[in-house]
Image (spheres, rainbow, N blue to C red):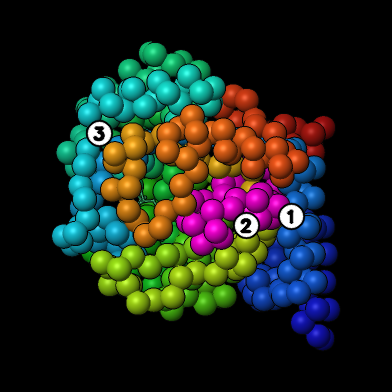
Amino acid sequence: MSQTDSFQQALSALLEGQLPSQEQLVCLLSASGDDFAALLAAADRVRREQVGDAIWLRGLIEFSSHCRCNCHYCGLRRDNQKASRYRLSEEQILAATGQVAAAGLGTVVLQSGEDTWWTVERLQRVIRAIKEQHPHLAITLSIGERTYDEYVALRQAGADRFLLRFETSNQELYAQLHPGTSLAQRLECLHDLQQLGYEVGSGCLVGLPGQTLADLANDLLLIKKLDLPMVGIGPFIPHPDTPLASAPAGSVDLTLKMLALTRLLLPTSNIPVTTALATLDGGRRQRGWQAGANVVMPNATPNVYWQQYQLYPGKAQLGDSLCHSLANLKQQIEAAGRYVGQGPGSALGRKENAHAEHTA
Ligand code: SAM
Ligand code: SF4
């Protein structure tokens, strides 16, 4: 069978709701030319039917660049002596959150390196203060691995969602890139978070050195198995002060195929266009939105710190303030024929509705 025939067969089966094999996913990930366009168009159609034309905005606050981990790809890794390290104060986080709320966004994302200075007690204080001041704002944490008890305490304080990518489902590759830790430990954290009722987001990097299409197919199967309401997928971008400095960046097209296949596997999920994708695609987010994505995370970190949070160089910038970024973003969203979603934009209710309709 030709690649196009195998592609057509695999895409039709996927659209009928069948779980694809690893081999079929590799075939779909190999799509080029008309097949590539057909894959993105199918994801765009399913996105419109299942989650509509809204694009949800999440205000991202990068509140600490300190990190105890040594992930080989990341500019914030512990051994990078050249990284600028900063921590926002509680007051600064609350002020930035106030701007997110005032701008009408429904979610704030608190992201950091794995920073042990930020004890659970300190984090709880911030979370409680945000909930007190902005009861309708959903709080997403993206702070890495913590103990089960810490995840319990943060949830009790009011955290609603948690982002923790598994990065790669290839156990050996994971171990190579994350010294002193394991994929099993990562998956246990994800399991704990799901058990505790967080709305959990996870996902992977595309284009890690040594990663194959079969690995990416397995990443997609893991995303499906975890039944994630939020899926973050971005291309790897080399940082000059890391062990992967001379590795090539991930491919934009392959990342778009991963987004499209995620949309087809999990039709009601929230899928962002990551800043890494925009960075490699000349600052544009449009192609991601046309490949199944429905979320974007404008940066609400105070300007002086924004550039210091450097996972990779050249981070795409939407504007020099949250207001300016939002104005630009709204223009891009409207130009793409979409509109800005209002409220927290949770995928959980959506999934339950889809399930109820299905079983009614
Ligand atoms: N420290 C927390 C963690 O690792 O989950 C949250 C912050 S971390 C900076 C957020 C994400 O940045 C990671 O999950 C990783 O996929 C991504 N990232 C780190 N370095 C990157 C790079 N060089 N290129 C693209 N994405 C990168
Ligand atoms: Fe730290 Fe996260 Fe970067 Fe790893 S990816 S070094 S945990 S900030």
Residue indicated by mark 3: 88
Q: Is residue 157 shown to the viewer in this render?
A: no
- Spatial separation of the CA atoms under disc 1 and disc 3: 39 Å
Residue indicated by mark 2: 259
> Which amino acid type is shown beneath numbered disc 2?
Leu
* Residue 254 highlighted magenta (yes or no): no
Q: Which mark is residue 235?
A: none
Q: Residue at the spot x=47%, y=40% of the render?
A: 319
- Spatial separation of the CA atoms under disc 2 and disc 3: 32 Å
**Ligand 1 closer than 8 Å to the CB at disc 3?**
no
N-term mark: 2 or 3: 3
> Which amino acid type is shown beneath numbered disc 1?
Ala
Q: Which mark is residue 43?
A: 1
Magenta stretch: dominant secondary structure = loop
Q: Residue at the spot x=62%, y=57% of the render?
A: 259
The magenta region covers: 267-292
Task: Name the foreground residue: 195 vs 302.
Answer: 302
Residue 336: % across, % down: 71, 44
Residue 190: % across, % down: 43, 48
Task: Name the foreground residue: 212 vs 357.
Answer: 212
Q: Residue at the spot x=64%, y=30% of the render?
A: 341
Q: Is residue 237 above or below residue 308?
A: below
Q: Nearer the viewer, mark 1 or mark 3?
A: 3
Q: Residue at the spot x=34%, y=22% of the render?
A: 95
Q: Residue furthest bottom?
A: 1
